[in-house]
Amino acid sequence: MTKLSSSRTAAPPGRRIRSGIGLLACAAVLASAATPSAQAATIGFDNVSNIVTPALPADSPLYNGGDRFTTDGFLAVVADSAFAQSFPDYEPGLAGAVVGAQQWSACTFLACPFGETSYYAGVNDGSLTLSREDGSAFRLSALTYAGIGPESEEGAAHSMGQLRLWGSTAAGSVITATADLPDLHAWADWTLDNAFAGTSLTSLRIDACAYTAAGACLNDGTLLNASQFAVGTLSVSAVPEPSALAMLAGGLALLGAASRTRRLRNGGRA
């Protein structure tokens, strides 16, 4: 009797190795494609591009409420205080400025910080809202900041108020954080706690409040135009889109399935 043999022959060892390497390479490509935006980045204000309007020239470093500019892949929207906007005859006013590196003349009448790089100055109770230009989510882990206020008598330092962060999420919730402003002319480093740094944000609003004599920190017109701040750099990381994560998971699942099939063909051997 003729012994029947299977027409399926095992691939040569070299071919199996090459096949495995190809699958690993495929998975690596999928992983890299899924996570490029997860790398850390820094938002600064050295490369600012104004969104030009009849009221905002391309080269203006001064911003009224409603003005917008871009920097390092983020859209920045300047806003007047809610108090200012509450008036029926509200008109946009000066709410921010980009101060150049070592631009000593920028703060003739205010106590501003100075540094090696440009920074954003939020003045007159105004705020700055940041979101990614591509609309994707991001996380904030740290920033450098300072206070802006009237020159104190005889150069005495004092704490003027707090910097406030308002992070909006895709679910519609808002997470907040506050930190005391440092002494006049001084910069401070702020590393956010895990609760804030681990939250994916769709936008981040930055403003300040000013301390009253009673110790309350307010930005409601009680201390008019006293809530002012400076932001130098912000350390951010983008959050991969769900589709990118699904692509990565699919690639890893494909690699796992191929590995199991290979073991079965080899009689359970790796």
Image (cartoon, rainbow, N blue to C red):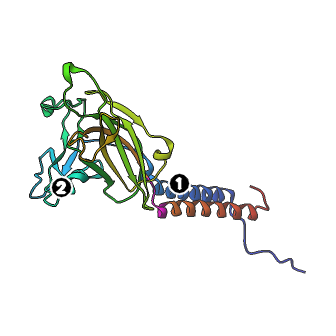
Q: Which mark is residue 28?
A: 1
In the image, the segment drawn in magenta is: 239-244
Q: Is residue 241 magenta?
A: yes
Q: Residue at x 43, y 61 (%)?
A: 170
> Is residue 90 shown to the viewer in this render?
yes
Q: To which residue does mark 2 refer?
A: 51
168 displayed left or right of 185 = right
Pinpoint residue 140: horizontal percent, then vertical percent: 41, 45
Tell me the amino acid under the disc marked 2: Ile
Pinpoint residue 250: horizontal percent, then vertical percent: 56, 64
Q: Is residue 267 magenta?
A: no
Toward the front, the furthest residue is 214
Q: Which mark is residue 236?
A: none
Tell me the amino acid under the disc marked 1: Ala
Judging depth in this view, the residue of 165 and 224 nearest the camera is 224
Toward the right, the furthest residue is 1
Toward the top, the furthest residue is 154
Quarter of the picture holding the N terminus: bottom right
Quarter of the image where one finds residue 148: top left
Quarter of the picture holding the C terminus: bottom right
For label 2, the SS is: loop
> Is residue 79 shown to the viewer in this render?
no
Quarter of the image where one finds residue 154: top left
Pinpoint residue 144: horizontal percent, then vertical percent: 34, 35
Q: Residue at x 33, y 40 (%)?
A: 217
Q: Residue at x 33, y 33 (%)?
A: 181
